[in-house]
Image (spheres, rainbow, N blue to C red):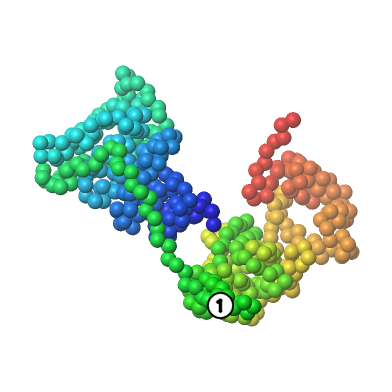
C-alpha cells in the first residue's frame, strides 16, 4: 500500500480519535515521506496515548521539516503549539507558555529565526516572570486587528491600530487562549515550583526520525517437489484464530424514503456462487471470501453473514447485484421513511422468528435485477392529487376491465383512462395535468374549472421557473 494510503487512513483515525490505530498507520506512511502534517498527526496521537517523548520528537521534527521546505509556516505554527500542549502535560508550564508565544509570533508573520528573547523572561533564580496579566494584555499585534473587539471595551475597536492580516488569525487566537490557561495555572503555583523553570529554546534541536522496528513474520518452509530447495512463505493464521470483529465487511449506505442501498466491500466475490436470502428484518449472504482469514471455505460458519436490519423491508421488492469487489443490496422499505442506520453484520447464519414465513431467496437476472416470488402486497401509497375528495389510490385502476397485458406501461394506462372518461372528465384531466406541469391529475371538473392547479413536485424536488 502506498504511503499516501496509509496516511489517509491514519489521519482518518486521528479524526475519529482512534489513537491506537492511528500510530501504526502513520508509522507506515512516514517510512516513505517526512510530511510535517503526518508528523503532527502522529504527535497528537502519541500525546493522547501519553507517549510524551515520542509526541515531542514528532512535533520538533515537524517544525524543522516545515522550515526546510520554506512554505510550511502553518505547520511551524502548529508544531510550536503542539510543543506547548505537550509541555503542559509534562507540567512544564513556563516552557508551555514560551512555545505558545512563539506560535503567536509566527502567526503574526514574524521571522522564524528572530531573537525575540521570550525564554529570557526569568529572574535571578531562573524562574519565569511573565504573568497572566501580561498574557491577557499581549494582543497589540493580533492579526486582522481591526476585526477584534477590545478586551476592556467589548465592541470598541482601536482607531490607531493597523490592520494586519496574515491568514493565520485562528492559529493566533488559539495560542493566545492557551497562554491564558497556562499562566492561570502558573499564577496559583508556589514561586519555587519546578513548573516555573524555563528549559526550552525557540528552535529545538533537530531529532532523528524514530525508526519503527519491524517484527519478522514467522516463516513456513516447504520443499519444492522438483529440486527439493527450501521455499519460504509467510504463515497463514490458524483456522478459527481470527475474531469475528476482524472478519466483518467494510460497508457504506445511502437511502431514500422508499429504499436503503447497502454496499458491502469484499474482494473475490463470485457472483455465480453467491446466495442471498431476504426476510423482513434480515439478509443472509454466503459464501463470502474473508481476506483476513484465508482458511475460510464455503460452508464454514465464517463464510456467511447475517445482516440485522434497522427496519422492516419488503423481501419481494428487494434485490442485489455483485461485482468482484462489492455486493450491493437495494432494500425496499416496508414503510416509507428514514432509518438512522442500515443495521449491523453478524458472522454466520442466524435464524430469526419471521424467517420461515417470509424468506425470499433471489438471484440476479441478466440485468442484475432480482426476481422473487410475489408476497402479500403492502397498503397502496397515496399520490398527490388536487381532488377535494381526497387522495386517490391509482393502483386500483389497474383492475379496470379490458386493460391488456401489452398496455401495462404508464402511457398505455393513461391513454385507457383518458379514453374511457367522459368529456367533462377529459377536460378536467387536461387542465389539471397541464397547469400542474404533469404533477397532478384530476377527473373532477367542478373542482378544477374555477382555479389554477398548482404544481405539486415529488418529495425532495424543488420547483424552479424556466428563465428563457
Which residue is at 86% across, 53% downward?
415
Residue named by callout 1: 222
- Comparing 378 with 267, the one in front is 267
- Compared to residue 264, the image places residue 219 above or below, namely below
Query: Residue 161: image x %, image y %?
Result: 32, 21
Query: Residue 379: image x %, image y %?
Result: 68, 66
Which residue is at 75% across, 69% downward?
371
- Compared to residue 21, the image places residue 138 above or below, namely above
Is residue 46 found left or right of 403 in the rendered image?
Answer: left
- Compared to residue 215, the image places residue 120 above or below, namely above
Identify the secondary structure beneath mark 1.
strand
The quarter of the picture where the C terminus appears is: top right
Is residue 119 found left or right of 386 in the rendered image?
Answer: left
The mark tally for this picture is 1
Is residue 324 found left or right of 344 in the rendered image?
Answer: right
Which residue is at 51% across, 52% downward?
3
- Compared to residue 116, the image places residue 367 above or below, namely below
Which residue is at 76% across, 41% downward?
435
The quarter of the picture where the N terminus appears is: bottom right
Q: How crowded is mark 1: few (under 14 residues within 10 Å), some or many (20 or more)?
A: few
Amino acid at each position: 500500500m502506498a504511503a499516501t494510503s496509509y496516511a489517509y487512513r491514519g489521519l482518518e483515525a486521528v479524526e475519529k480519535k482512534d489513537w491506537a490505530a492511528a500510530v501504526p498507520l502513520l508509522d507506515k506512511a512516514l517510512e516513505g515521506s517526512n510530511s510535517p502534517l503526518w508528523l503532527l498527526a502522529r504527535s497528537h496521537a502519541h500525546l493522547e496515548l501519553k507517549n510524551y517523548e515520542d509526541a515531542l520528537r514528532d512535533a520538533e521534527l515537524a517544525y524543522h521539516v516545515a522550515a526546510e521546505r520554506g512554505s510550511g509556516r502553518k505547520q511551524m505554527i502548529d508544531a510550536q503549539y503542539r510543543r506547548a500542549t505537550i509541555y503542559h502535560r509534562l507540567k512544564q508550564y513556563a516552557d508551555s507558555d514560551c512555545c505558545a508565544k512563539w506560535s503567536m509570533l509566527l502567526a503574526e508573520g514574524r521571522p522564524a529565526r528572530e531573537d525575540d528573547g521570550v525564554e529570557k523572561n526569568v529572574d535571578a533564580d531562573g524562574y519565569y516572570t511573565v504573568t497572566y496579566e501580561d498574557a491577557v494584555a499581549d494582543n497589540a499585534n493580533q492579526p486582522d486587528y481591526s476585526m477584534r473587539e477590545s478586551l476592556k471595551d467589548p465592541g470598541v475597536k482601536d482607531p490607531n491600530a493597523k490592520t494586519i492580516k496574515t491568514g493565520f488569525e485562528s492559529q493566533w487566537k488559539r495560542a493566545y487562549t492557551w497562554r491564558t490557561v497556562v499562566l492561570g495555572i502558573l499564577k496559583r503555583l508556589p514561586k519555587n515550583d519546578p513548573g516555573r523553570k524555563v528549559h526550552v529554546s525557540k528552535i529545538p534541536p533537530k531529532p532523528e526520525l524514530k525508526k519503527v522496528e519491524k517484527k519478522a513474520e514467522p516463516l513456513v518452509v516447504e520443499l519444492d517437489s522438483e529440486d527439493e530447495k527450501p521455499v519460504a512463505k509467510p504463515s497463514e493464521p490458524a483456522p478459527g484464530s481470527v475474531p469475528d470483529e476482524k472478519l466483518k465487511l467494510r460497508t457504506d449506505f445511502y437511502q431514500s424514503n422508499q429504499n436503503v442501498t447497502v454496499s458491502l466491500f469484499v474482494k473475490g466475490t463470485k457472483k455465480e456462487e453467491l446466495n442471498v436470502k431476504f426476510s423482513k428484518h434480515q439478509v443472509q449472504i454466503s459464501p463470502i471470501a474473508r481476506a483476513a482469514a484465508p482458511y475460510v471455505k464455503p460452508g464454514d460458519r465464517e463464510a456467511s453473514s447475517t445482516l440485522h436490519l434497522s427496519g422492516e423491508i419488503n423481501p419481494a421488492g428487494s434485490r442485489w447485484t455483485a461485482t468482484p469487489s462489492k455486493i450491493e443490496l437495494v432494500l425496499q422499505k416496508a414503510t416509507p421513511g428514514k432509518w438512522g442506520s442500515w443495521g449491523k453484520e453478524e458472522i454466520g447464519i442466524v435464524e430469526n422468528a419471521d424467517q420461515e414465513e417470509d424468506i425470499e431467496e433471489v438471484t440476479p437476472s441478466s440485468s442484475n435485477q432480482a426476481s422473487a416470488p410475489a408476497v402479500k402486497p403492502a397498503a397502496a401509497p397515496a399520490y398527490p392529487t388536487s381532488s377535494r375528495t381526497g387522495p386517490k389510490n391509482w393502483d386500483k385502476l389497474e383492475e379496470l376491465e379490458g386493460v391488456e397485458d401489452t398496455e401495462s406501461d404508464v402511457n398505455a394506462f393513461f391513454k385507457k383512462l383518458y379514453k374511457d372518461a367522459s368529456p367533462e372528465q377529459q377536460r378536467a384531466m387536461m387542465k389539471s395535468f397541464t397547469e400542474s406541469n404533469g404533477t397532478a391529475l384530476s377527473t373532477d371538473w367542478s373542482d378544477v374549472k374555477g382555479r389554477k392547479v398548482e404544481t405539486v413536485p415529488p418529495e425532495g424536488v424543488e420547483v424552479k421557473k424556466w428563465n428563457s
